[in-house]
Image (cartoon, grey):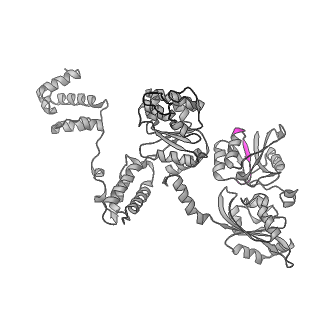
Amino acid sequence: MKIMISTRGDFVSPRFDLSSEVIIATYYDQQLMEEPRSLILSDVSAEILCDLALKENVSTVICGGIEEEHYQFLTWKKVTVIDAVIGPYADVLQLLMDNRLKPGTILPGVTSREVAA
Amino acid sequence: MKRPSALHSSPVFAELLNGIPHGIAILDRDLCIVTINRFLEAMIGHTAEEARGVYGEFILRANFGSNNQPCKEVLETGESLSIDGNIINRHRKKISTHFTLSRLHDEQEQPIGVLIVLEDNSVAKGADSIGQEHAATNEILGHSPQMEEVFELMSVLARTDASVLITGETGTGKDMIAEALHKSSKRARQPFIKVNCGALPEALLESELFGHVKGAFTGAVTETVGMFRLAHKGTIFLTEIGDLSLPLQVKLLSVLDDREFFPVGGSKKVKVDVRIIAATHKSLRQEVQKGNFREDLFYRLNVLHLNMPSLWERDGDIRLLLDHFLRQFSEKLGRNVTGFSQEAIDFLIDYHYPGNVRELRNIAEYSANICQGQMVEMKDLPQYLFRPEKSSPTNSASIPSSPSPSSVEQIQSVENISGGWAGIEKEMILDALRKSGGNRTQTANLLGWGRTTLWRKLKKYELA
């Protein structure tokens, strides 16, 4: 399973359309196949991210707030979107591998102290 | 830090916040949510309980500066800020919002947090944005489920860069849809070039599409870039693609595959980055079966398919469009035509509009011009609407100039026979022969012909 998480620093970015970083990871049987790859994008745009998701052939996109049209586009392209997720991406990834990640999940560790750290 | 928490614990304060008709968020000095009011709960889709303690930016999902920069600025300087922006809520809705950020103090004037007021601008901006959207989509109107489906599909098609094939009867708005698709795609700022493949002869069309070099043929005194190069990085709209000749179909197929071509008479390949939208009122699948259209090109164009419903299929849209066009033409002409009489509207709703929206628009324009009062009456409608429709141009053109009453009956009875006029005529002769018991003179009289004509026709159809 190949996944893409739109990130800002160590966290899932609050908005998909304003993300300039993504993490791409591949896992199988609750194990990461390789070290997650981080990509920095030159432009910030939901369209670029949608194209990237298709180009990378990911099966799941994890993000914060996403507009309906981009959500519909990705789901139409058979990409599962788990949106409105708040939390550190490493924990989010683990939760996904454990098959426990749901849209709207708010994980611990999202107060300003952790964000600043 | 303690103060807002203490305030939040007071039920009076909570009620006070809930009474304000705007979204309110109170952030502590670490810019984490202390509380939000009910209005904001509804706006963002998170409850106050869920949001409490979470870094404000993660919950609000606003577009004002990255990493909560404005909040930090307000906390540091103490100066209030007003920003126009938007939020994306949990239900994936983008809400245009006006933010007002102010610093909160304690009794010693020490900063203890930030107050954010979020005013939902979407209602005020709704009308504008709908207007803009309509301008962008060239005022494609329709509330019918069929059109809702089209609009839904359009939003998906606009996001892709694949070729689109638009089909539908004449006058259904294929051109408008193509333009709207271009305008809402990422190529919107690039050119949109429309080429009517049925309007030009083959040789001219090739030069029109792909351009030609100087001296490529007699009269080619200058180099022409062609529509494909004009549409570079944009969209080319090939309307009436079904009329494209077979040799040009081959060339178009190679352009679609390789994204490059040779201009007429040129020896240098030209590369283009063009999105192709094609439209036709013909059934391309049937054209493929007939051998008039290349199968490979059909599949190449038919990556994404959008079929425009004909007007009679669009439940409830006729009334909407009639009112819209009447109002539009009435304003344009400076008339005071307010609507249609009940009788006229009933008639127009029942009419089947073979010319679809184009015909409906013309009816509305005609009515707005002719109507002398405020309401369009039956007499103000085009007269052709009341005439019985002819079955087909071929049949009507071939009807004898002065047929006898009996032959008219015969013509009407055999109108739906397949095989064109020849088939109909043969059937008419056989019918007349049957009625006259094989008597040729009576048969000729029945048909309104002379005996010689009948004899000639019998020979022609091998009935003699």
- Image location of residue B293, percent across then percent down: 47, 29
Image quadrant holding the C terminus of chain B, namely top left
Question: Which residue is farthest left?
Answer: B441
Q: Is residue A59 magenta?
A: yes
Q: Examine the rendered structure and indicate whether residue B248 appears above or below residue A55.
A: above
Residue B125 in the figure: left or right of residue B204 = right
Residue B67 in the figure: left or right of residue B179 = right
Residues drawn in magenta:
A55-65
Q: Going 27% across and 36% down the picture, which residue do you hit?
A: B395
Q: Relative to the observer, which residue lies in front, B261 or A22?
A: B261
Q: Relative to the observer, which residue lies in front, B211 or B340?
A: B211
Residue A87 found in image quarter: bottom right
Q: Going 76% across and 66% down the picture, which residue do you hit?
A: B48
> Can residue B270 be seen here?
yes
> Can residue B439 be seen here?
no
- Image location of residue B83, percent across then percent down: 70, 65
Q: Examine the rendered structure and indicate whether residue B252 appears above or below residue B237.
A: above
Residue B162 in the figure: left or right of residue B371 = right
Residue B332 found in image quarter: bottom left
Question: Which residue is farthest bottom?
Answer: B107
Q: Going 46% across and 32% down the picture, which residue do you hit?
A: B221
Marks counted in the figure total 0
Q: Does the magenta stretch include residue B187?
A: no
Q: Examine the rendered structure and indicate whether residue B274 appears above or below residue A17.
A: above
Image quadrant holding the N terminus of chain B, namely bottom right
- Image location of residue B375, percent across then percent down: 34, 64
Q: Relative to the observer, which residue lies in front, B48 or B104?
A: B104
- Image location of residue B436, percent across then percent down: 14, 29
Q: Main secondary structure of the magenta part?
A: loop
Residue B93 in the figure: left or right of residue B14 = left
